[in-house]
Image (cartoon, rainbow, N blue to C red):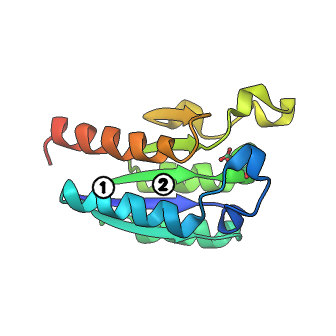
Amino acid sequence: YKILLLNGPNLNMLGKREPSIYGTNTLADLVEQLSKQACEMQIDLTHVQSNAEHELIDAIHSAYKKIDFIVINPAAFTHTSVAIRDALLTVDIPFIEVHLSNVHARESFRHHSFFSDIAQGVICGLGTKGYSYALDAAHQFLQNNGD
Ligand code: DQA
């Protein structure tokens, strides 16, 4: 199976950025840990992080008919981007939405997501572990849907 991991704006600063909220693991640590996990599950994992909305959209378009599942943390675009939502609907690839922090315990503008109602599932508040759980769930989803 081929899975695309997408990380949105400011996640390149993971480890330095508000560590009390987002933890001290860097994005490189996270990607390394997930790549190992993917390897054990014989999953081909590709990672794209971008601070630019159009680059995330382009990455989703490139996944069309090539990628089986997407794990995405749209970061601040979660709360703003109809365009990324539409891109996911366009390619029709199942996805899990992940957030490091518990967005529901934070400012009210973080309570709404443009993705949750079209996601296979949503994980938030569990830190980097959330990505690991998402990868596991994606693997099981693909096995159960047998393609
Ligand atoms: C985030 C939560 C968003 O509200 C925020 O804008 C982020 C990160 C998270 O992983 O907790 O950049 O998606």
Residue underneath mark 1 = 37
Q: Tell me if 18 is positioned left or right of 140 in this view.
A: right
Can you see residue 80?
no
Residue 72 drawn at (x, y percent) = 52, 52
Residue 58 at what x, y percent from top left? 55, 72
Position of 24 compared to 79: left or right? Answer: left
As helix, strand or loop, the secondary structure at mark 1 comes to helix
Q: Which residue is mark 2?
A: 90
Residue, x 55% and y 43% (percent of image)? Answer: 98
Look at the picture and state if 74 lies above or below 46: above
Q: Nearer the viewer, residue 126 or 146?
A: 126
Q: How many marks?
A: 2
Q: State the mark number for residue 104.
A: none
CA neighbours of label 2 inside 10 A, class few (<14), some (14 to 19), many (20+) = few
Queried on whether the Cβ of the residue with tag 1 lies below 8 angstroms from ligand 1, the answer reads: no
Q: Residue 81: percent from the left, percent from the top? A: 71, 51
Could you tell me the amino acid type at mark 2? Answer: Thr
Q: Is residue 120 something one can see in this rendering?
A: yes
Seen as rendered, the residue at the extreme left is: 146
Residue 47: image x %, image y %? 45, 68
Residue type marked 1? Gln
**Location of residue 104 (image quadrant):** top right
The kind of secondary structure element at disc 2 is helix
Quadrant placement of the N terminus = bottom left
